[in-house]
Structures are given as structure tokens and as C-alpha cells.
Image (cartoon, rainbow, N blue to C red):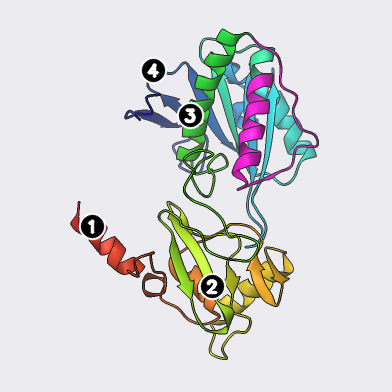
Amino acid sequence: MNNKQYAKTIKLFLMDGDPEGRMMCELSNWNGKAYRIPRGKVKDCSDREDLESTSVYLLFGKMESTTLKPKVYIGETEYAVSRLVSHVKEKDFWNEAVVFISKDDNLNKAHIKYLESRLYEIALQAGRYELVNDKTPTRSAISESDQAEMEEFLEYIKLLVNTMGFRVFEPLIHKKGEDSATKVFSESNKLFETNDCFYIKAARGADGRGKRVTDGFVVLAGSEIAKEIVPSCPKGTQLLRDELIDGGIIAAKANALVFEQDHLFSSPSSAAGLIMGRSANGLKEWKDSKGNDLSVVEEIEITDV
């Protein structure tokens, strides 16, 4: 299969002349259209006829702490603005909505039910957001040709949502398929051969593994943190450590403190400091399988450009 990616042109229209206001997004050679609508601007959309149409939409809420995921609600409707008005009255977690419509009115009820179900499924698999739907959306049965068309529509939805800054459909770690060479820790915490991974093995039980991602650094499930922190450990690192333990992201196992799931950090240094229980320069502490630290790896990458 040809997986080549082609350049895209995205047209953004600031409807209120304000980057914090309403935004219309269109993509070259696509019959869809997206609206990004702040909660306080829903009332200003009442005169837009295209938003009283069949659509699939997402409601986004902010992350309330380092151990809690941001929230998202995924829905479908035949009357977009009216549905958003009802959500303003009934749901208080969200502060922005993203609505997708078809410019040629080619989305029917079966189509949007299919899109809603698939978006829910993809977001659940990605695991970045807490899905707050009361129940799992049911998937409508559509023809094979319609399904192919909706899957293409989905790809554009994912592209635009990501472009808007909501990484709800992006997994923390991109795998190359079921037979990916990237593997997790075994029950005995033995490291297997990996691709593009960095490691920390240090005093007081610190034994971590992580990967660079576009929005930070991910410490992988199974990584062990130092059993104790040093007296000079930064206060912020101590607080984050306590939050991750209290939130169940790090748990005690066989006399070790272990990450129960992959966890995203803002930088390699914040990840290294948490694992080592002290101040840490992530560019120096994280090393690849050949023993090169992250700063050396990045210098080589820049030199090769």
C-alpha cells in the first residue's frame, strides 16, 4: 500500500477577527468544513445556516491536573447549533467545540453515526483524552462505497483536529503495526530490543525507558523510578511524583515504583528528574542503545540535515 503523504493547504478564517474567537477551517480538495467555536461564542452562531445541518462534533475540556487527562465528548446531530446550545446548558466541563459539516450536504444520519462511532473508537485507542460520553456510540451499517468515503472524511477530520492543537486522535507512541519492533517491559522488567528508545539506569532503583514525541517525551510503561528522592530534589518534581503515585500512574510493585502506563512529560529533563528523584539534564541522562546521550543524538541529526 502506498503510504506517501502529500502536502496540504489549510485555509483558516478568523470569523471574529480574533485568534481566541470563532474559526472556520477548510482543506484543499475536501468537501468538508470545520468550525472551532469557544463556549462563549455559541450564541453568535445562531445565524449560520450551514451550522443547522447534519454534523459530527467534539467538545473539549482542559486538563485539570498533571495526572488527569483532558476531557472530550464526541457526538453527532442533525442541528449543530441547537445541539451546542443544549450542551452549554447541560454540560459544564467543556470550553471549546469543533464541528464538522459537509459543504455539499452529503452527510446523512447514517454517515454521521458511523463517523461518531469511529471517532470514539480512535480516541479511545489513542488514550490521550478522557471520553465523557455516557455510552459508547453505536455504529450504523452503511454501504461499502459509503464506508470508504467516510474513512477518507475521517482522515481529514483527524488532520484538522490535530492542526487545531487537539491531539485526541494521536497515540502517544506511533507503532508500525502489530509486528512492531518496539516492545514493552516483561513482567520481570527485563528490557527487550527496541527502536528509537532512550534509557536511564541510575542509583536508588531508577530504571527508565522512553521515547521522543512531537509534543514532549514519553516514559514507557514498566519504567521504575528511584525509591527515594534526594534532599535537594526540586519541589515541583516532588509534587509531580506524589501526584503520579496518588493518581495510580505510578504504583508499588515487588519493592519497586513502576509506571503502570505510558506517560507524557513536557521535556526529557522533567521525565529524567522524576525517574531519578533529583535535578536532571535530560539531554545528558537519557542514552540510546549505543550509549550516546540525547544531546549527541540530536547533534548528529542536525548535522545530517
Judged by depth in the image, the label closer to the viewer, 1 or 2, is 2
Residue ID for mark 2: 207
Question: Is tag 2's residue or tag 3's residue first in the polypeptide sequence?
Answer: 3
Question: Is tag 1's residue or tag 2's residue first in the polypeptide sequence?
Answer: 2
Relative placement, left or right, of 245 versus 1 is right
Q: Amino acid at mark 1?
A: Ile
Corner quadrant of residue 98: top right
Q: Residue sitting at 68 percent across and 13 percent down?
A: 110
User: Is residue 110 or residue 219 the one in the foreground?
Assistant: 219
Residue ID for mark 3: 24
Neighbor class of circle 3 (other Cα within 10 Å; few <14, some 14-19, many 20+) is some
Relative placement, left or right, of 266 versus 305 is right
Helix, strand or loop at label 4? It is: loop
| Region of the chain picked out in magenta, as a range | 113-142
Q: Measured along the vertical axis of the image, is residue 245 above or below residue 133?
A: below
Q: Measured along the vertical axis of the image, is residue 214 above or below residue 18?
A: below
Residue 29 circle label? 4
Question: Is tag 3's residue or tag 1's residue first in the polypeptide sequence?
Answer: 3
Q: Position of residue 199 (x, y in %)?
A: 45, 67
Q: Amino acid at mark 2?
A: Asp
Instruction: Judge whether residue 105 can be spotted in this image.
Output: no
Question: Is tag 2's residue or tag 4's residue first in the polypeptide sequence?
Answer: 4
Q: Position of residue 121 (x, y in %)?
A: 65, 33
Question: Is tag 4's residue or tag 1's residue first in the polypeptide sequence?
Answer: 4
Q: Residue sitting at 63 percent across and 66 percent down?
A: 188
Q: Amino acid at mark 3?
A: Met
Quarter of the image for the N terminus: give it: top left
Judged by depth in the image, the label closer to the viewer, 2 or 3, is 2
**Residue at mark 2 to residue at mark 4: CA–CA distance:** 49 Å
Judged by depth in the image, the label closer to the viewer, 3 or 1, is 1
Label 2 close to label 3 by CB (< 8 Å): no
Q: Residue sitting at 53 percent across and 52 percent down?
A: 183
